Amino acid sequence: MLRSLVVSLVAFYKLPNGKCPYIEWSSALPSELRARVDAYLERVRLGGGRHSIKALGDSIFEIRVHAGAGYRVYFARKKGGNMLILAAGSKSTQSRDIKKARFYWRNYCASVK
């Protein structure tokens, strides 16, 4: 699981076409909700919010955001401990979003070898 999640860098996964799934998702949120999601990410980055983090296996974690439609943010830990934000979505798209996050993480790992 996560021993210490304090990280200095948060990166966002980019698709081969240069688009970032998380940025596109968060850009569509109302600004107040986007700020709440960003606050959750910052809290986790600084080592807090452990009650909102769930390990999903394959080095992927889910952050439950207690706002709106039960939003989730999916991330992995890169070498050096930095966070790579993979994807996000609501509770209603959770299983599909987890599959995307796993796919993105596999692609990322294959590209850095």
Image (cartoon, rainbow, N blue to C red):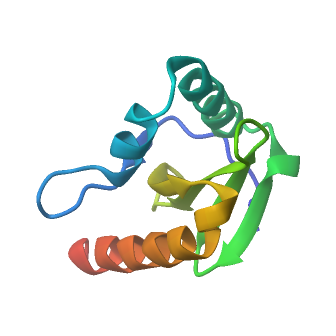
In the picture, the quarter occupied by the N terminus is: bottom right
Q: Nearer the viewer, residue 91 or 105?
A: 91
Q: How many marks?
A: 0
x 71%, y 37%: residue = 68
Q: Residue furthest left?
A: 17
Establish if 100 lies above or below 23.
Answer: below
**Left or right of 85 in this view: 113:** left
Report x, y in % for residue 64. Answer: 74, 50
Residue pictured at 35% horizontal, 53% vertical: 21
Does 25 appear above or below 30? below
Whole-percent x and y of residue 7?
A: 57, 40
Q: Residue furthest right?
A: 51
In the image: residue 57, left or right of residue 16: right
* Relative side of 109 to 93, left or right: left
Q: Percent position (x, y) of residue 50?
A: 83, 48
Q: Quadrant of the C terminus?
A: bottom left
- Report the residue at 21% width, 51% height from top: 19
**Residue 24 location in percent, x, y?**
33, 43
* Residue at 38%, 33% in the rendered image: 27
Q: Examine the rendered structure and indicate whether residue 46 appears above or below residue 88.
A: above
